[in-house]
Image (cartoon, helix red, strand yellow):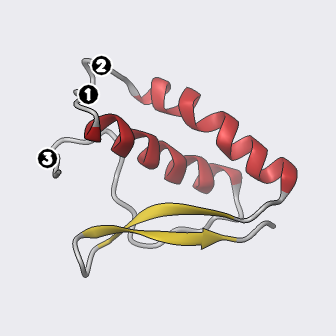
Amino acid sequence: MKHSKRLTPKFDNVGTNDLHDFMSVMCANMETALLQNGANPDCDYTHLDLMKLAAPFALERFKSKSSLRVNVWDKDSGLFKAVPLVGP
């Protein structure tokens, strides 16, 4: 399911060793889940809502230094792809 309007960008390349970068990726992932379930940007959720949803995941990742996988936009295929994340 494609959505033309997003509050977050689709990332081509991400650095995940910084909390702010990881938060941005997690916000994009949260938004994808909301869109896939019929939510409408700025009506059903805001940028702040995405940050609040993403924060626990991002903070846990940096606290535990565990390896996670998140979906990032692959501009070549036009799809999201799972990318492994490695702790700092």
Tag 2 near tag 1, CB within 8 Å: yes
Tag 3 near tag 2, CB within 8 Å: no
Q: Observer-nearest residue: 62 or 34?
A: 34
Q: Residues within 10 Å of mark 1 (few under 14, many from 20)?
A: some
Mark 3–mark 1 distance (CA, rounded to whole Å)? 13 Å
Q: Secondary structure at mark 1?
A: loop
Quarter holding residue 66: bottom right
Instruction: Say which mark, if any, is on residue 39.
Output: 1
Between circles 3 and 1, the one closer to the viewer is 1
Outermost residue toward the front in this view: 37
Q: Is residue 31 above or below residue 17?
A: above
Name the residue rendered at 40%, 63% in the picture. 11
The answer to whether residue 59 is left or right of residue 70 is: right
Mark 2–mark 1 distance (CA, rounded to whole Å)? 6 Å
> Mark 2 belongs to which amino acid?
Asp
Tag 3 near tag 1, CB within 8 Å: no
Instruction: Give the mark nearest the N terminus, 2 or 1.
Output: 1
Instruction: Give the mark nearest the N terminus, 3 or 1.
Output: 3
Outermost residue toward the top in this view: 43
Name the residue rendered at 75%, 51% in the picture. 61
Residue topped by disc 3? 4
Residue topped by disc 2? 44
Instruction: Give the mark nearest the N terminus, 3 or 2.
Output: 3
Name the spot of residue 16 as percent of width and height, x first.
Answer: 64, 64
Name the spot of residue 7 as percent of width and height, x first.
Answer: 31, 38
> Mark 3 belongs to which amino acid?
Ser
> Mark 1 belongs to which amino acid?
Ala
Mark 3–mark 2 distance (CA, rounded to whole Å)? 16 Å
Name the residue rendered at 47%, 32% in the picture. 50
